Image (spheres, rainbow, N blue to C red):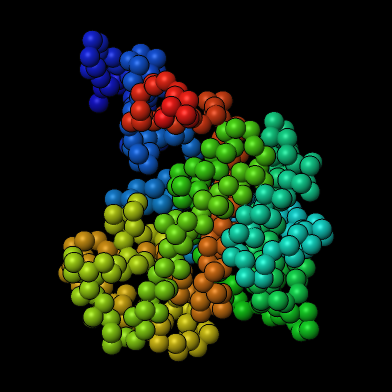
Amino acid sequence: MSDTAKLQVPGKDVEYPILTGSVGPDVVDIRKLYAQTGMFTYDPGFTSTASCESGLTYIDGDEGVLLHRGYPIGQLAEHSSFMEVAYLLLNGELPGKDELASFNNTITRHTMLHEQLATFYRGFRRDAHPMAVMCGVAGALSAFYHDSTDITDPKQRMIASHRLIAKMPTIAAMAYKYSVGQPFLYPDNSLSYTGNFLRMTFGVPAEEYVVNPVVEKALDRIFILHADHEQNASTSTVRLAGSSGANPFACIAAGIACLWGPAHGGANEAALNMLHEIGRPERIPEFIARAKDKNDPFRLMGFGHRVYKNYDPRATVMQKTVREVFKELNVSDPVFEVALQLEEMALKDPYFIEKKLFPNVDFYSGVILSAIGFPTTMFTALFALARTVGWVAQWNEMISDPEQKIGRPRQLYTGPTQRDYVAVDKR
């Protein structure tokens, strides 16, 4: 392949370098396009634009590949822990035994929130959406932790990263407790990251909470599978906010706000709502027929993926996990039976096979979270909890990049051309 791309524009021919990454498509470096031609590119949604250089996560949607620092997501979800993956994303390599122990210790000792934040929670209505609470509290952290907001100091950046990863489960659990009128539980440093979150969410002061290891492992896997997903909408939002020099807590609050959108973080909730709509296994053929009908607006939620044109690699792990959780918790809800039978029928149906409409991670994660006992309003909050790791890793990478500059997308202007102001009495 040529190392330059040639572009013909009225009046001149220009050449642009072709850059090659370690894996994936080459990119055309068009940073000098406007200076040389007076033109911009037009790419709504930035789906054909590389907004940054990154060494964190690689996705090949056609082949169903997801790598974190080169490691396949399936291997990490099967054999690793969320804390290991967090260390990997932040530092570039899997930790040794002592490194992991030190990292666990650091995160564990940052899990408590400033006591005044309990008062902050009480300013919300009890029926406030957990994402509204998380967005507000995450942004408010910058008002309490002034010693980690200097983004020019690498040590402060890492302290802020550790604090965000450590405190997000506490923030999410307190949002849940507040919504159901139960007292907040302080973190327990003897538990794992995920076990501690389960206790803070479902435990009560009146009795001891025993963490179920099957549930703990399932939730830890869900956290791993949602830890990072390249330059998606919320990650791009965090990077864009960070490019202005905003403090890390404000950047993560911006990411939470973006993730809240139903087209992004709310997909597993939509999938579970669809299963409730189907209701009983015997109604599945009716809804499959509707999904095939072009004139019917009904869509099978949790099937197919915007990025993955093949099987979602994260869903493979969830197939096994959903059955482990159902068996452990002795689940007999017809909605969960609908999920298992719908999965089986769709995987055998020629229409779904031809269209590559395979179950994705959202299809499975929603039914697992519901079986564990989380209300649907908490699903996106759990997504935000897990994705915080990816957000802070991406933010750190961006701040350290010498090529980084403030984000400033261009536009194709189609409004009125220049015109003169007319006084109000003459209009």
Q: Is residue 375 above or below residue 75?
A: below
Residue 220 x %, y %: 56, 66
Farthest-out residue, right:
115
Identify which residue is drawn at 52% across, 84% down: 328
> Image quadrant for the N terminus?
top left
Question: Left or right: 312 with respect to 70?
Answer: left
Of 107 and 398, nearer the camera is 398
Residue found at x 22% / y 73%: 290
Query: What number of labels is visible?
Result: 0
Query: Is residue 125 rendered to the left or right of residue 51?
Result: right
Q: Is residue 247 visible?
A: yes
When asked about the image quadrant of residue 384, the answer is bottom right
- Identify the residue shown where x is 35% and y is 51%: 307
- Relative image position of residue 146 (x, y in whole percent): 79, 42
The residue at the far front in this view is 425
Q: Nearer the viewer, residue 74 or 32?
A: 32
Q: Where is residue 377 shown, x and y percent of the image?
A: 54, 69
For this rendering, which residue is in front, 37 or 334?
37
The quadrant of the rendering that contains the C terminus is top left
- Residue situated in front as seen by the camera: 183 or 85: 183
Choose top left, top right, bottom left or bottom right for residue 14. Answer: top left
- Whether 375 is drawn above or below 137: the answer is below
Which residue shows up at 41% across the image and 68% down it?
Answer: 270
Specify whether 318 is left or right of 182.
left
Residue 221 in view here: no
Picture coordinates of residue 360, whole percent (x, y): 37, 64
